[in-house]
Image (tube, coloured by chain):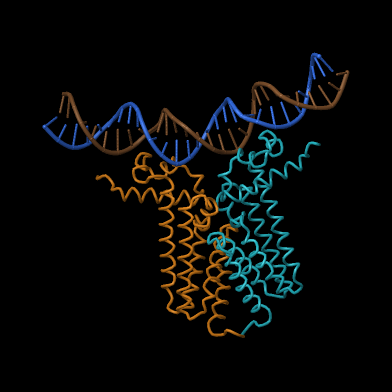
Chain colours: A cyan, B orange, C brown, D blue
DNA sequence: TACTCTAGAGAACGCGCGTTCTCCACCGCC
DNA sequence: GGCGGTGGAGAACGCGCGTTCTCTAGAGTA
């Protein structure tokens, strides 16, 4: 049996960190808990990552990639712009149903650390800006005015926090219905 | 000079706790920082409150009362149901502009502590449920269908997180515009 | 003036944090 | 068989946490 590569171990660590941080928050999870969950000794952890904040940053980057692919997979399921936008809320509904759903990691981390961790705050801000830009692209594809995109993004944000706190997935349906109304009105029937 | 009453000291402590927790989060603020900010000795703190969690709970209760009065003051400024609902988003815009705005305390605290503090999670859930119920009342007053209220609440939630992370108050305007569209469509012109 | 009682200042306590260091078992190599 | 070196297990370190305890200065009373 060969020794695992650094990258393989890094992945194990980040998988464990993702699970723990999402379940309990950042500050509540110590390095020793991460060692226990990942099975990687403390010494090796600090050979692979310079500090805890770097691990958090990597977890956020991986979550950003995961989110992006979820969005892209969702929009890829529909050909028409209107349905491509709505597919995002269907994706949210599926996500909210997962057992370990505890809200958006970016919102939670920002709420916990705020501006006290500027590096992380910047990653969070960039993630949200990236999503808003993607929604804007999809809205432009649909021929909708520029004012629609931020409204749809706010619906997605609100659905995430509402679902997390309420512990139900109803918010996804409500957000989808609102989005449908806004999109339909923005496309074509500008004045009833 | 008479010695201050217990209630007066409690208020001083809760004022300080509110400032600190909102600025830095719950776990990042120790009891010693609270002692320094409030000027109340540690011994007295523990005479007035049984534990830190009780202080956090009180801070949340006060924030709930503050939020409720902000909402009621806002809706009281307008006579017509449509404008009463929209006044909530105007209130949000003013709130986002405050220097110490760092997002919704309830969302932030839930993100930080999650289900790890069941008492606090219940307070948070109850707060959000209360707001949703109030929006539902206002929607009913306007004669709108029941599906409108959760959509408007989700817009308010999304605006708060979006504004906090972006550091701007634009989200309030976007949410207001979306709310206006949804309300107008729900009232009367059900089918274009 | 002596004495009691209160309350404030801060040390103490046990623990857990992020990070570093020590020790030793085990590996390939001569 | 000896041996240097890698890496794992976990102790150590300095600190801060939430909470409790000790000590002392001072006010009020006989």
Residue A178 versus residue B7: which sits nearer the camera? A178
Dividing the picture into quadrants, the one containing residue A41 is top right
Quarter the N terminus of chain A occupies: top right
Quarter the C terminus of chain A occupies: bottom right
Residue B7 versus residue B93: which sits nearer the camera? B7
Task: Please indicate whether residue A158 sits to the left or right of residue B78 in the image.
Answer: right
Q: Residue at x 81, y 36 (%)?
A: A2
- Against A44, residue A92 (above or below) is below
Task: Please indicate whether residue A110 sits to the left or right of residue A41 in the image.
Answer: left
Q: Residue at x 63, y 69 (%)?
A: A152
- Against A113, residue A159 (above or below) is below
Picture coordinates of residue A86, whole percent (x, y): 67, 71
Picture coordinates of residue B76, whole percent (x, y): 41, 73
Picture coordinates of residue A180, whole percent (x, y): 64, 75
Task: Please indicate whether residue D2 sits to the left or right of residue B28 in the image.
Answer: right
Picture coordinates of residue B24, whole percent (x, y): 51, 48
């Amino acid at each position: 049996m060969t020794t695992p590569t650094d990258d393989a171990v890094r992945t194990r660590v980040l998988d464990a960190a993702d699970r723990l941080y999402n379940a309990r928050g950042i500050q509540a999870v110590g390095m020793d808990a991460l060692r226990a969950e990942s099975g990687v000794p403390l010494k090796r952890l600090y050979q692979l990552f310079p500090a805890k904040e770097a691990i958090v940053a990597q977890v956020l980057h991986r979550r950003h990639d995961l989110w992006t692919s979820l969005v892209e997979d969702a929009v890829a399921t529909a050909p028409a712009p209107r349905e491509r936008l709505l597919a995002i809320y269907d994706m949210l509904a599926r996500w909210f149903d997962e057992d370990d759903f505890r809200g958006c990691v970016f919102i939670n981390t920002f709420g916990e650390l705020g501006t006290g961790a500027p590096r992380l705050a910047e990653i969070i801000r960039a993630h949200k800006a990236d999503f808003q830009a993607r929604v804007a692209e999809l809205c432009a594809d649909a021929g909708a005015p520029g004012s629609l995109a931020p409204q749809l993004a706010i619906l997605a944000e609100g659905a995430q926090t509402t679902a997390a706190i309420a512990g139900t997935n109803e918010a996804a349906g409500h957000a989808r219905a609102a989005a449908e109304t806004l999109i339909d009105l923005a496309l074509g029937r500008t004045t009833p």
